[in-house]
Amino acid sequence: MEELASSISADAGNTSGDLITVGFSQVGHESDWRTASTNSVKEAFSQENGFDLQFVDCDNDSEAQLESVRNFIQQQVDYIIIDPIVATGWDTVLTEAQDADIPVIVIDRTIDDSDKYTAWIGTETKNEGLAAGAWLKAYAEAKGIKDLNILVISGTTGSSAQIGRTEGFDQYVESEGWNKLDEQTGDFTQDGGQKVMESYCKSYEGQFNVVVCQNDNEAFGAVDAMKAAGVSYGVDGDVIVISFDACKAGLQMVLDGDINADFQCNPLQGPDCAKIVQELAAGQDVPAKTYMAEPWYAHDDTVKSVSYTNAAGEDVTEDMIVVDQSIVDAGY
Ligand code: GZL
C-alpha cells in the first residue's frame, strides 16, 4: 500500500496538548480540484488556528483510505475528516471510530452505506448533472441541433461525484431520447481523459457531437486527444464539450471557447469544516449537512439560465454565468 503521509503538526518541540488533533484522510492528488480541496483544509486547520493536522493522501486507493482512518483511531486523534474515495464500504470503520469516541466529519463526496458520522459538508453532484442536461437541451434547441450523439468520460467509478453527475445527466438522456454512445471512466485524471478520448476518436469517428467530461482534468486530456485526431470541438467546433468543477484552468478554456459549459463543484470546504470542529470542541450542536454554493458557467449567453427539478424535488431556475477574464482570475 502506497501511502503518502505527511504530518503537518507543529515541529517536535510543540506541546500539542493545547491543539486539537485532526486526522484528514484525503482522496488523493488526481486533479486541480483536489489540490484546491487539500490546500483549503490545510490552511483552515493550521497550528495558528489551534490545530495539529495529520494529513494522509490515499492516492485514490480505497484500502489505503480505510487503513489511514484506522491509524487515526489508533493515534487517538480528537477528530477525523474523510473525503471518501468511494461511497460504500464504510460502516465497519466508522463503527470503530464511534466506539473510540472520535467524531467523524465527511467532506465533499458522500458515504452512502453508513450514517455513523457527525456532519457532512459538500455539494449536490446530482444537481450538477441535472443542470448540465438542462443546459444541453436548451443549447441544442437554440442552435437547431436535432440529434445529440453523446460520449461520456465519467469520474472515479463508485464515487458519489460520478454517481450523482451520471444520475442527473442521464435523466435528460432518457427524457429527451438522446443517443449516449458510450460511457467510460477517466478516473478524474487528465491522462485518463486523454486515453478514453483517443479510444473514442477511433471507435466513434464521425459519430459524436457531444463529449461530457465529469471533471476539468478529463476535459484537458479529451481536448488534447480530439486535437490530435483532427476533431473540432468547443464553441466553433463540431463537438460540444461539457465539463464539471470549473477550476481556474477549466474556466480559462471556457473563456477561450474550448469548453462550452462548465458546472462548478466547490472544493473549498476547509473553513466550514474547521468551524464545525471548533463548535464540536466547544460542546455546541452542528448542522448535519452543509451545502456549498456552486455556480454554472458558459462561454456565451446562448442559454441565459437553466430550469430543472433538483435532487430535492424543487423546480429551480439558475443563471448561467458568462465567463470573463476577471472570473478566471478569481478561480480556485
Ligand atoms: C467532486 C470531487 C471530484 C472532482 C474531481 O465532488 O470529489 O473529485 O469533481 C475530483 O476533480 O477529483
Image: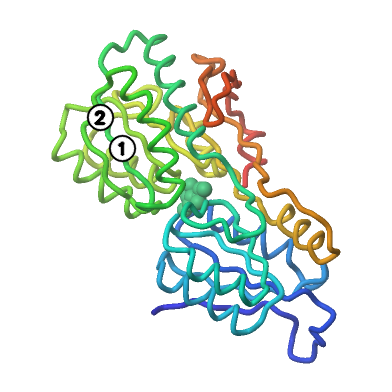
Q: Disc 2 and disc 1: Cα gap in Å? A: 8 Å
Q: Hey, what amino acid is under mark 2?
A: Lys
Q: Is residue 261 left or right of residue 272?
A: left
**Kind of element beneath mark 1:** strand
Q: Identify residue for label 2.
A: 180
Front residue (pair 106, 246): 106
Residue in view at x 74 percent, y 61 percent: 44
Spot occupied by residue 323 in the image (x, y as percentages of width and height): 58, 28
Spot occupied by residue 294 in the image (x, y as percentages of width and height): 61, 36
Q: Is residue 236 above or below residue 254?
A: above
What mark, if any, has residue 47 been given in the picture? none
Quarter-of-image position of residue 331: top right
Q: Quadrant of the N terminus?
A: bottom left
Q: Is residue 145 above or below residue 204?
A: above
Are the residues at dot 2 and dot 1 in contact (C-beta closer than 8 Å)? yes
Residue in view at x 66 percent, y 54 percent: 119
How many C-alpha atoms fall within 10 Å of the one at disc 2: few (<14), some, or many (≥20)? some
Q: Is residue 107 left or right of residue 280?
A: left
**Kind of element beneath mark 2:** strand
Q: Hey, what amino acid is under mark 1?
A: Val
The CB of the residue at mark 2 lies under 8 Å from ligand 1:
no
Q: Is residue 18 left or right of residue 190?
A: right
Q: Identify residue for label 1.
A: 152
Front residue (pair 277, 34): 277
The CB of the residue at mark 1 lies under 8 Å from ligand 1:
no
Quarter-of-image position of residue 265: top right
Spot occupied by residue 325 in the image (x, y as percentages of width and height): 62, 33
